[in-house]
Amino acid sequence: MQYSAANCNRDTEAASEVVLIVDDDFTTRLLTREVLEQAGLTVHETDDGSHALALFDRITPDLVLLDVMMPGTDGFTVCGQIRKHPAGQNTPILMMTGLDDVESIRRAYEAGATDFITKPFNWLIMGYRVRYMMRANRIFQALGKSQASLSYAQRIAKMGSWEWDVEKDKVEWSDAVYSIFHIDPCGFDGTYQAFLNSVHPQDKEPVNAALEQALTGARPYSIDHRIMLSDGSERFVHSEARVVVDRDGRAVRVAGTLQDITERKQTEEKIRNLAFYDSLTGLPNRVLFKENLEHALAHAKRRGRRVGTLFLDLDRFKWINDTMGHGVGDRLLQELAVRLKQCVRKNDFVGRLAHHELLYSIARLGGDEFTIILDDIADPMDAATVARRVIEDVARPFGLEGYEVIVTASIGISIYPDDGLDIVTLIKHADTAMYHAKELGKNNFQFYTKSMTESAFQRLVLESQLRRALEREEFTLQYQPQVDLSDGSICCLEALIRWQSPELGSVAPASFIPLAEETGLILRIDEWVLATACNQLKAWQSAGLPAVRVAVNLSGQHFQHKTLHDTVRRIMKETGVPPGSLELELTEGVLMGNGEETVATLDALKGLGLTLAIDDFGTGYSSLSYLRRFQLDVLKIDQSFVRDVASNADSAAIVTAIVAMAKSLKLDIVAEGVETAEQLNFLAELGCCKMQGYLFSHPVTADQISTLLENGVPGYQRRDPEARLSPEFPTPIESADFSLKSA
């Protein structure tokens, strides 16, 4: 079956093939036609050599039978003409001649003949010979197509072949390899050294080593390396080859392929950058940071050295983002990355610490968090030196879009193996130390200590309990009165939150309020305080007690979430308190932190009829121009100035200036933290008659406030506004009935 199919295929191929006979002898043409047609070939003929080329152009034969000696144009000339024809370059030409001299045969081949046959013919052999030549031509054409396809595929793949005769030191390249190397074949001397001259200087040694290993072990050769082109540019190539050995096992030849993989390498580099580098700063990201730290630890373990991990976080970066926009914030991070790299590279500082080279890696973990790995350090103080220099460099002003921006950094440091043996522990401990640096006032660095872990654990417990405190109704409110000495009345009550935890006991506001701010719980807590204070205020009013305002402190986070106005309006509506009886206290940092959005929110709150106060004035960043922008009613002087007002000239001058400024802006003035008669007298002389502090009352419960509202503060009962103040003042309230606690 296979044989029959093969014959069928062969006959089909033959039936489609055309032969052109050019001979002036009629008998020869007739007999030849008969033999070839019996073989299934299509035959065309002519007796004139001058007409042969025109007929060839029309029928494009698969083989030409050409007589040598013809009148007019002879066979040698016709053969040459066919070879010049675009379609005749590879057409088999069998020249027929009655001549048997060597010269005629030589001329036939020079003219381009494929083969020759002499007259008289053996007709059986003639048929076989023609079919053999045509079959060989089919194979040749198929090979040509295959080579063309291979060449095309190699051009697409930018691949070529090469071979090196080791004994003769002769290198042969395909045209594609010459093209990849941008080398003219005429200028290539064909030696291994000539090839090596084009290899990138940093890759010559690896290439030599790989080839030497292949020759020594008669193993396959495979390597990626760079080459240098004549214009100075670089390309990446991949080379693979096999080693050919002789009977004695000696390597005599290496043959293989070479492919230009530059685009693939560039794509891989882009993918790597996306996977391992921060898109904003170009620094390694969290993934690559962990890999680098892992490698540093392995290296330090082998050499018995230390590794320092520095965890850096910017101070007040969120404030910059909120006030100046994320564009400026991003630009700051980019400039910071540049500054960090320059700082750590400084030769006079890092080139040699403790008489050894200091290796490093900087990364951005996300947001405003950066890390620095100090590899192979001898002494932990090397890390301290780096941290100190980084803090100094970060603190230098940044010039961004016409603004001079100043930020500081807090850095935590952990040391391998002292503070941990794995990357998870070292990162955690460096992060813990960084938070400790922030707690100590920011703009400093701290080494990790075990006590920090205990503190962090306590903080974690505190956060866990704080999240459940609202649901478990563990919060209460106390109130501290503000006294108006002009008539002895209680003009306002400041609501102060207290937390009594079943597990932790009494927790001071200074401990849990900052944590609530950090975790975002402050929004829910503030809303609870506001609702509870308004409900209590309504209860006092319903009981017929003297009218009084209640002041509630608010976090700046309400301004960022833009829900404050709706929340206050809803609570006032639910509780039914008059707008004029509610005062909202805001710090300077809140007022300065949100620009025009803050102004709009305060205007909306004023539209509800509320009283607005600026709390702890003098400790923030306010100026007269800023205060004029806001519709404020009350200015509260911070107790840090009031404390020393009677004994410190600077504090006295500051308070005097604040009071004068408040009066010029027509703001009510309240002095906080008044504890002594001397402080009271000084403030009264300045015209500041509204005061709050232990001299009048500690923060007390709502029931105790009811008594104070009904009877007045002992020693400061409501009096005739024209009466002069008594020169002697009673001591603060501390009777057992009030069960007072420290604020």
Image: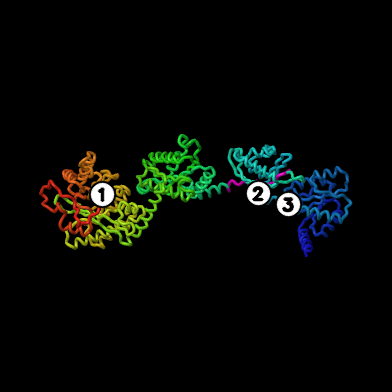
Residue span colored magenta: 251-264
Q: Which quarter of the figure is the N terminus placed in?
A: bottom right
Name the residue that disc number 3 marks: 143
Which label's residue is closer to the chain start, 3 or 1? Answer: 3
Q: Does the magenta run of residues contain 260?
A: yes
Q: Amino acid at mark 3?
A: Leu
Confirm whether the magenta stretch covers residue 592: no
The one of 188 and 611 positioned closer to us in this rendering: 611
Q: Which residue is mark 1?
A: 614
Lateral position of residue 149 relative to residue 522, left or right: right
Side of 477 relative to 340 (left or right): left
Circle 2: element type: helix
Circle nearer the viewer, 3 or 2: 2
Tell me the amino acid under the disc marked 1.
Ile
What's the residue type where badge 2 is placed?
A: Gln
Residue 369 spot, x, y in % from top left: 42, 47
Kindly report the distance in space between the C-alpha atoms of the residues bearing marks 3 and 1: 93 Å
Crowd tier of the residue under label 1, counting other residues whose Cα lies within 10 Å: few below 14, some 14–19, many 20 or above = many
Q: In this figure, which residue is indicated by the disc labeled 2?
A: 154
Mark sitting earlier along the chain (2/1)? 2
